[in-house]
Every structure is written in C-alpha cells, then in structure tokens.
Amino acid sequence: MFNFTLRHVLVACVASAIYLLVSWGLIGFKTDQLFLIALFSTLYLASSVTRKFILGFSIFIVYWIIYDYMKAFPNYAFNPVHIKSLYDAEKNIFGILQDNITLTPNEFWLQHSYTFVDVMTGIFYLCWIPVPLAFAGYLFYKDKGQFLEFALTFLLVNLLGFVVYYIYPAAPPWYVHQFGFEFHAGTPGNTAGLVRFDQFFGINIFTSLYAKGSNVFAAMPSLHSAYPLIVTYVGLKYRLGWINIVFVTITVGIWFAAVYTGHHYVLDVLAGILTAALGIAGYNLLTKNKKISGLIERYRNTIS
C-alpha cells in the first residue's frame, strides 16, 4: 500500500513534530491536531499520487493553521473593537424604517424570520468551506495551473482578511443584540440565527462549528462572503458551464444568509466582496513577476 523512502518518513516526522510543538506552545494540545497529522502523513506516505495531492492541498492546510493560531493572538489585544460605530454606520446607510424606528437589516430579519428561509440560509452557510474545497479537488485533477490559481488566490484573500481583522477588530450584529455596545474580551462564538437551522433538524452542527471559532471580533470583512466569490470568479474565467449558475446562486445565498442570520452586517459583506476582488487582482499582479511565477511553476511541477 505505502510507497515512500526514508526521506519521505523524515519529512513527515519533522513536519508533524514542528506542528505539534508550535501548536502546544501557542494554543495547547487538541485532538484535531492529531487528525491533521494523521491525514497529512498517511497521504504523504501512501503513494506518489496521494503525496502530490496533499502537497497541493497544503495551501489550505497553511490557511487552517494560521486561522487556528489566531487564538493565541486575539485581535482585540492590538486595537480597540468597533461595536457601536459599525452598528451606527450600518443603520445610517442601510437602515430600514419600521413603525417610525430605524432598524439595521439584521434587526429587521430578526423580527421577520421564516422557517423556510432559516433552512435555506443554513444550507447556504454550510457551503462556505465544502464548496471551495470540492471545487479545488476538481481543479486539481482537471488542470494544476487552474488549481494553483484558485488555491493561492484563496490563501491571499484570507491573509488580506486576517490583516484587516487586526487593523479593524469588529463585533458581529449578534454581539450587539446580546451584549449591547460594551466590550467583553474572550466572548465565545455564537450560532446567532443559525440556531434555528439546528433546532429545526434537531442537530448541533452550527453549535459545534462556532464553538471552535478563533475570535468573534473578526466580522469585518466577511470571508464567508469572499470564498464563494473566488469560486465563481474562477468558474466564470474558465467557462465551466452550467455549474456557474450553481456557484452564483450559492454566492448570493451566502451573502444574504450572512445578514439574515445576524453574523454580519451588509458592510461586512461588502468588505468581504472587496477583499476577494483585491485578492484576485493581487494574485494576477504578483504572477506578472518572473520570480514569483517561476516559483509557482516549480510548485506546479511538484504536484503534477
């Protein structure tokens, strides 16, 4: 079954040891870390085909590790959290007048929720990671160049988003609904309106997902809104046909769900769209550099 050399074993062992030691030092030990190590090591050692696959998808592993390590460096420790100012801006720009009271779109939908919409928005929100990963898997076997363009753009968009998280820490709408405008450090994640999806099906899928969140004060920009836009961009660029209709539907659905469920303001969604656009433009600009394009080409040869 396995096809490896001593060098491959050493690489897997050293990478796993470094990851465990750094993780233990920054965020402590978690069983998720052992699962990631087992997945990487198994695929890296199993065969040349799986080795190329996991090396390609290491781009997404890097994203996950950085995101996880953000727990060790909460953004609210570096800059003040924007709570009331963001809420007021949302109300001033996108406020909805109801009974002579101006509501944010989140407050409006909190008062006008519907079971069908609860289910649909939950389904859309469940797509935010599986769809990009499934699309990446498809591109990996279809065209390594397209795969790297998508994966590296995805990573760049996330890095841009993480930078903004630290420059502009921001509370999500549900935080204002629960705590008002007072800052509470270390507030745990919350399912907000997505709890209605869990309750309808009698499950805890969103409850468990948001319990693992790195930082609730990272609402601006909405990377939930950025991810499907990257998928749609690549799909349209390479003319993938009818599937683009699905991608566009999921993208718009996630944008609406982000606001409807109280996880993001409209401003957060617009910032996520802008971040995706900057990431796409940034990747295209960077690849015009011969050294960078050369490194990407070497990476492509490694996973081909």
Image (cartoon, rainbow, N blue to C red):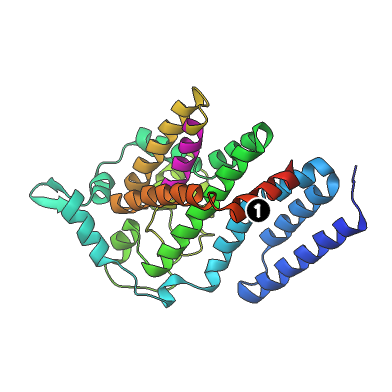
x and y percentages locating residue 149 in the rendered image: 57, 43
In this picture, residue 3 sits left or right of residue 256: right
Q: Residue at x 42, y 76 (%)?
A: 78
Q: Is residue 195 visible?
A: no
Q: How many numbered circles are shown?
A: 1
Seen from the viewer's position, the closer of residues 58 and 297 is 297
The secondary element bearing badge 1 is classed as helix
> Callout 1, which amino acid?
Leu
The residue shown at (39%, 69%) is 167
13 up-or-down from 257: above or below: below
| Residue located at (48% from left, 53% from top) | 157
When the figure is inspected, residue 190 is found, relative to residue 269, above or below; the finding is below
Q: Residues within 10 Å of mark 1 (few under 14, many from 20)?
A: few
- Quarter of the C terminus within the rendering: top right
Can you see residue 240? Answer: yes
Residue 171 coordinates in the image, percent (x, y)? 35, 63
Q: Is residue 272 magenta?
A: no
Q: Residue furthest left?
A: 100
The N terminus sits in image quarter: top right
Horizontal side, residue 247 vs residue 113: left or right: right
- Quick one: 133 or 121, which is closer to the camera? 133
- Which residue is depicted at the point 11% across and 52% down? 101
Q: Nearer the viewer, residue 32 or 205?
A: 32
* Left or right, 133 with reference to 229: right
| Residue found farthest to the front | 290
When asked about the image quadrant of residue 132, the answer is: top right
Circle 1 residue? 295
Q: In the rendered structure, which segment of residues is drawn in magenta? A: 224-236
Q: Horizontal and vertical percent for residue 214?
A: 51, 63
Q: Main secondary structure of the magenta part?
A: helix
Provide residue 190's location: percent of width, then percent of height: 43, 58
